[in-house]
Image: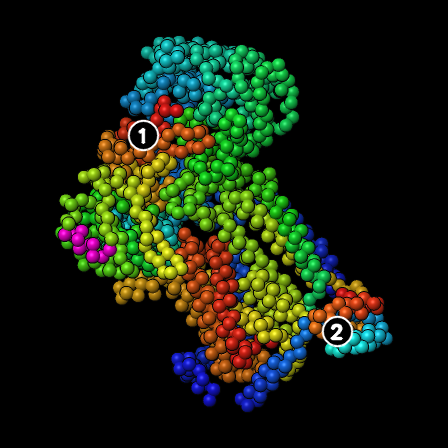
Amino acid sequence: MSDNNQNKMQQQMKQRLENLPRYTYKAVGYFTSSQDMQIVIDELVNKGIMDLNSRALSENYVEEIYENSPFFKRELYMFLNSFIIGGFVGAIAAALVGRQDLLLPVFSPILSGGRAVIVLLGFFLGAVLSAAMICIIALYKPFSSVEKGYYMLTIYSDVEKKQQIQDILNKYTVIRV
Amino acid sequence: MKDKNKPFLVLYIKIYITEQYNRCKISKLLKIKDDIQVKRLTIIICILICATLIFGPIKVLYEYAIPKDVKPTQSRMHMNTGNTTRVEGDKTKDIAVEISEILYPGINGVGAADGYILINSDKWQDVLSMIPLANKYKAPIINVNKENINTVLEYISTKKPKGISLLQNAMVIYAGNQEDISSTIAKSDIKSYNIAYSDLNQLIDKVYSLPGFMEKQDYGFLVPDSNPIVSIPVGTWIANQGGLLLFYNNEKKPYESGLNIVKDTKLKKLYYLTEDTNAQSLESYFKDMKLKLAAVTVGKEESSAVNFARYYDPEEGIGWDAGDRRKDSSHNYIICSKEAPTVAALAAQLSLAGKSGPLLWTESNKLSAKTEGYLWSMKPNYWVSPAEGPYNHGWIIGNSDMIDYSIQARIDYIFEIVPYKTMGEQGVSGLDVISIIFTTAALCSALWIALHAALRMRYMTLLIKLMWVISALVIGPFALLIYILCYYNVPWTKMNGKKMWLRPLWKQTATATILVVAFGVSTISALSFWLTWLGLPNLSALNWSGFFLLGNPIILQMIIVYLAAFIINVFIIMPVIMNQMSGVSYRDGVNKSFLSVLISLTSFFIGRAISNWWLMMVYSPISPDESQIIWWGFMQLAAVIGFATAYVPVWKLVRYGKVTGTM
Amino acid sequence: MIKNESLKRRHTALLILLPLIVAALIAYLIFYQPNYYPIQVQPAAEYIRPKVTKNTVRIFAGDIYQNAAALTQITYPSSFEDDRPNAVILVREDKKEDGLLAASVTHHPINAPILFVNKDSIPEATWKEMERLDPQGVFVDDNVKAILIGDIGKEVKNKIKSKGWRYRHIEGNNPFKLSKNIDDYLASIHGDHRDTVIIASIDAAEYAYPAVSWNAHMGDGLFFVEKDSVPQEVKDALNSRYGKAYIYIMGGQNEISSKVVKELASYGHIQIIPNNGDIYGNSAGFAGYKDFGKNFGWWISKRNRDFGWGIAEAGHNFIFINPNDWHLVVSASVLSHKGKHGPMLLVQGDYIPESVKNYLQTVRPSKTTPQEQLYNHGWIIGGEKLISTKLQAEIDMLLGYEEGVR
């Protein structure tokens, strides 16, 4: 590729990045039929929410969903829950180890730090390990409510319109993942 | 034309290196024929870096769990160590003499005992019941029989005891019913006092009626006669501070002798020791008496000694109180084998004088886990200098077949005073905890990102996937956060068949900085690990020309790793990334990436190097090496600080299109 | 293409496997204890049971090499990696000054005890102890396992090499040159020349004995001067300090002339360790000596100087040693490096000099409560001829509580 071409591309790229539409909110909904989706699209457009993207899911729908949204909200909640629960379990176990009521011989040197150190370690180790475990399991969670032939609608907008979008999506039978 | 705007020095370096590169044709040097081979090399390097950053912390864990360099035999000239003293002796008699020699060396009358208590019994109960007497009369206990009585008497006569004033200056108290022994004693010049007894009950009865014995006795301990593990630790306290020792039997009934004594005297408090809480029946025997009863539930096996060491009754000031609250005081421990209770009962005497303290049990061939945990929890640490103390000391009782040498060595290690900040190599301080958490989080984040990218980011090139994984290994959960922020709800577009993520500038900068972390800083971290493991270079010869700092191993290491990271990035990794992003050729890639790598890596390195120096050389009392988790903690903390210092320069680079953050 | 079914399979597999792995791990943690045990001790031919009393432990063996080994056996049980030293320091047994200077190298991060060698050979006792110690390697210096001090011949190096150990040789044919080289070596490791410096006279090196244990404990520099002049190497070394040095002189006017003191004053701040007129008073004076204050600062941070044991209360360790045997002084320095770090006190045969006795009286513990076990500990270095058993018993009494008090 010549230098000229290179520079041109770089300029193009820069322009594009500078003129980025600044979406601050994104929502995804799934529909069993295109008619259902059309009703929602109409209502969204009526409310002035224009940046929409829709497609029918093919055989390869798992990858299509992943491509559209690599992270799911439910995973954040699972992470937080497992972090906190794992943390508390770890902290309680660590407190027992600290009192020497629970004997873990391999962890004896940890007792040198004092009880606060042990509880802190127990909390975070428990939290990190359980969160990691749960999050890894959650990665592979199969899709039960979406299938091939369904329709996927992606809505981009400002975060101020979040409530409005949510209200519309809740009004109709929209499948959420 | 553009080059005019660059600072002169940068321009010069760039021209110089480009010339050098053209001259030696690095691609030929590396036998690279085309771009694909560079790409392959890049991936190999990334995988090596990744493997190093995973292997390092796992090596720490492995060496922690599976001790290194434990050799089955060792040749020694003596059996003492810095924090432990071994009381050698293979039979109870040897040990008894050894202990009395330690307590009362009696050289030409210096440090002599008042008298000696000879007991013709090898039962731990009999020995233990004499300990109150040993405390009262300042007389050590030696057990005797027909074979050794003569040598013991000879020994005593060389020690010139002062005589026990309460017993008409008797030098020896003999307890036992073998008449030939008592007659041997009588024949010698040593003035003696005999106690003939048939059973423990009678012995206690007789001992407690000795002149002056019951004076100032206002508390006592009631212990089981069938459980040495629970009963013997009490001996240390009685040896040091006095108090009565009474027994109860298997049916939880106190001995008659004990009950009579308690009835006749004005004891204030009686502590009864039990394995479990199921001993209420004992209390019924003392219902009608005006004395307080206190149950001391100590638990089973090694726990009983540990719990008695921790026990404290604030009301009377009874108990060693050697627990967390007194961690900052010095402590001495008498370490005994569970298999030799009589020896342990004799050893309890060591608390009569000098380095006194509670008794702890261990198995013969390995340090019992409970005791080990307790000793760790009492590990001494200092703030300013190890000369300030506190110091712990252990008496190890018996020959190495009674307590193995490795147990002694382990106890010595646990008792070693260490800095508060790091708690030594194996001990765990607050800093260690932060390092452990951070490292675990880094490994978990990397694993999760790897799985996530493999499953859900299929269009991402292998190199970019590796970038995220490696950056998680270097800056841990921060990389995970940036990863999620950079892909969550971010729209993308396709350019030249490549996916471009349309992110705001700050996220682009974060991604571009991650690029430096993943390929530059990770190289630095991985190389630092290998250099430290294999031994850092040291050029003390430089001192003679005045540049002593350049000879410093840490500074040399920094220079080496920086140069290596720079070269690998400019000549190998960045051209490949550039090629993947915008299709430039390898040579153009080198030219284009030179400046951006120089700026971003240098700015990163400045933050990292300064913080690493401060952590390693100034903050840490003893600079850690790669086998300690704290080294990894420091490495990651320094990388996070480096991330912060590199962010602004990288932002500038992104702003002017020199670096992209859209991958 | 990812199929939903394959996701389902992997999800179920993980749901079963991961909790199983976690459960197995927890079970393993409950039962697993790292194995440091057991180790069979083979008593050496010269195995001894030195006299132990409640507050003192005697350490000695046969000759100077065995004595040094007996002392390193106190400090380094070497039963697993972390209680091994990083290296051994080898010093010639006929070079007293070299030995005294070498103690500075003992300090962290080098962490190495001193053993004696001959110019051209390594005695068997030393060799055996080197094998027992099996050093880990000094990571700040190319993982060397031996540090050779002074004029040591090729044969020693070859023998070390034959073991596969790397070594560092700090050369210096005379003590002045050697002191400068040791100082430079340590400066390259610490990235700084220590500002606190001890100066003693080469003609009265006995005054430097207490400094040996301090240097093993703290790693400060030791330099020798002549009674009436400061050697050029020492001047260079003092000059290489950033700012002014803090110079502590060990010895009185008879040992170091006022001319020298004046000359030294141009390199920094000077203090003279109280010595009460003799080497015994010097050892007691140094044990109680403390100099604390400014050293180096740069706006947002500072480092203070903290020189001297300054021990004036109970609860410490002391090394009792007879100055007649300098080998013991050098090898006992390692006792101040690990374990119960403490100063060296000089005693003679069977009496404690008055100044040392007075010092021990001031640090004698008083009985408080049984829960507060404040005790002093004493190492008695050498055999009966150097410190008698009676003296050991006396020291034992002086270190413990006074009988009949409280």
Labelled disc at residue B225: none
Q: Nearer the viewer, residue B81 or B122?
A: B81
Q: Which circle, 1 or 2, is nearer the viewer?
A: 2
- Report the residue marked by disc 2: A154
Tell me residue A35's x, y (percent): 86, 75
Which residue carries the number 1 mark? C398
Q: Percent from the top left, x then y, of residue C98?
A: 24, 50
Residue C403 inside the magenta-drawn segment: no
Chain designation of label 1: C
| Residue drawn where x is 63% and y is 81% of the image | A19
Q: Residues within 10 Å of mark 1 (few under 14, many from 20)?
A: some
The image position of residue B378, as x and y in percent, is 48, 39
Number of disc labels: 2
Residue A26 in sight from this viewpoint? yes
Q: Amino acid at mark 2?
A: Thr
Give the vertical position of B497 relative to B453 (above or below): below
Alpha carbon of mark 1 to alpha carbon of mark 2: how far?
A: 87 Å
Q: Please, what is the dominant secondary structure of the magenta stretch?
A: helix
Viewer-closest of B343 and B13:
B13
The range drawn in magenta is C259-268
